[in-house]
Amino acid sequence: MSKILVIEDEAAIRRVLVKILSEENDAYNVEEAEDGLRGLEAVKNNDYDLVLCDIKMPKMDGVEVLEAAKKIKPEVPFIMISGHGDLDTAVNTMRAGAFDYISKPPDLNRLLTTVRNALDRKELVVENKILKKKVSKNYQMVGESKEISGIKEIIEKVAPTDARVLITGSNGTGKELVAHWVHEKSPRSGGPFIEVNCAAIPSELIESELFGHVKGAFTSAVKDRSGKFEAANKGTIFLDEIGDMSLSAQAKVLRALQESKISRVGSDKDIKVDVRVVAATNKDLKKEIADGKFREDLYHRLAVILIKVPALNDRRDDIPLLIEHFVKKITSEQGTAPKVFSAGAIKLLQSYDWTGNIRELRNVVERLIILGGKEVTESDVKLFASK
């Protein structure tokens, strides 16, 4: 049932609005407030799906109510009710976050259509928030070790900025996870997060993949195509395994960082891009620079903030938490009952040498869930996860 609040100081108009909405749809639960102060108090203390708010009211006008309400309940849509002389103000309230406005006396069809549209929009916003939470759960940083706590602190400080981040660490340590956290905790979280695995793309195609191309730029370029930098506009591009990028592509990435513009392969036309760059590598880039395989100027552009992700062997205290996390995640995905790992099983897993890091641990946990008993014991670990 949709809960609607009508804030209107003219009793006759308030009654009409309540009557129209109540009779139109049994699923509308309509409440009323006779002035702005009481209306704002109701918004603070209740969860409304929609608010209809008059503009000209004593004690507190509708614009003040809207501005105050948006600070405490930003997701609640407001439809402003305006008299003939309030139309300019009504238009300005749209800039302040109002969904729409209706004029007095309210036209029945216009009112009901606007209400339905506003409620649909609220439902969509809620669904998107739920979906975003589900997406975020896939990228949880699990662990309470000193090393992981330090990374979380750095992310909290750097995420709200546009500073470039270079993430280093061995394969399977969770560098991609760190990149997602930087994006999701940033003001760009509503924009795209575009991943590029530089090691998986042939060197002759990496420039086209990153910057796009125009028709005829090369044999298979049968039409214009935008690249990953354009796709990431207003968001974040994650350049994974950047140490494997060709020197010619590095030069173009450097220009994109310096000038915030790119050009497609085969074109001399500049395209402005607003992109935050987060990069990752499992290589020692300083050694790559010394060997002439990586540009030093690009390194300094990328490494404004350096985050080193530790190997699992260096954060063994986190293994019990990681096992618990993987058990919940894997059994949820498979639709099976969660399993318990015995203290002996966990202790044995903590003693292993995890050369494949977190990725290897997850695979082992999944194997033990499938092959182990109702309680995964030390014997199960020796039998199915022996190293």
Image: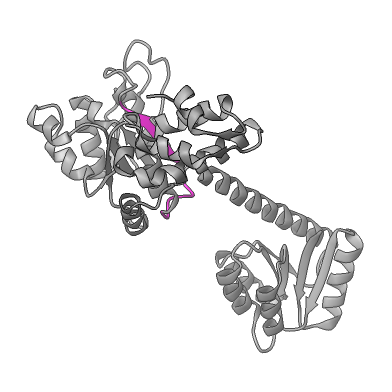
Residue 43 at what x, y percent from top left?
Answer: 68, 73
Is 35 magenta? The answer is no
Q: Quadrant of residue 17?
A: bottom right
Q: Nearer the viewer, residue 252 or 372?
A: 372
In the displayed structure, does residue 166 sit left or right of residue 274?
left
Magenta part, dominant SS: loop
* Residue 268 visible in this rendered orientation of the protein: yes
Farthest residue, direction left: 290
Q: Residue at the location (53% across, 45% down)?
A: 137
In the displayed structure, does residue 300 sit left or right of residue 40?
left
Q: How many marks?
A: 0
Q: Residue at the location (78% across, 55% down)?
A: 113
Residue 53 at what x, y percent from top left?
Answer: 71, 73
Residue 128 at what x, y percent from top left?
Answer: 61, 48
Q: How is the image coloured?
A: one colour
Quadrant containing the N terminus in the rendered view: bottom right
The residue segment tinted magenta is 186-198
Q: Residue at the location (42% across, 40% down)?
A: 347
Q: Quadrant of residue 371?
A: top right
Q: Nearer the viewer, residue 52 or 93?
A: 52
Say above or below: 292 vs 154.
above
Farthest residue, direction bottom: 59
* Residue 275 visible in this rendered orientation of the protein: no
Q: Residue at the location (87% across, 76% down)?
A: 15
Q: Nearer the viewer, residue 145 or 48?
A: 145
Q: Nearer the viewer, residue 118 or 382?
A: 382
Residue 302 at what x, y percent from top left?
Answer: 23, 43
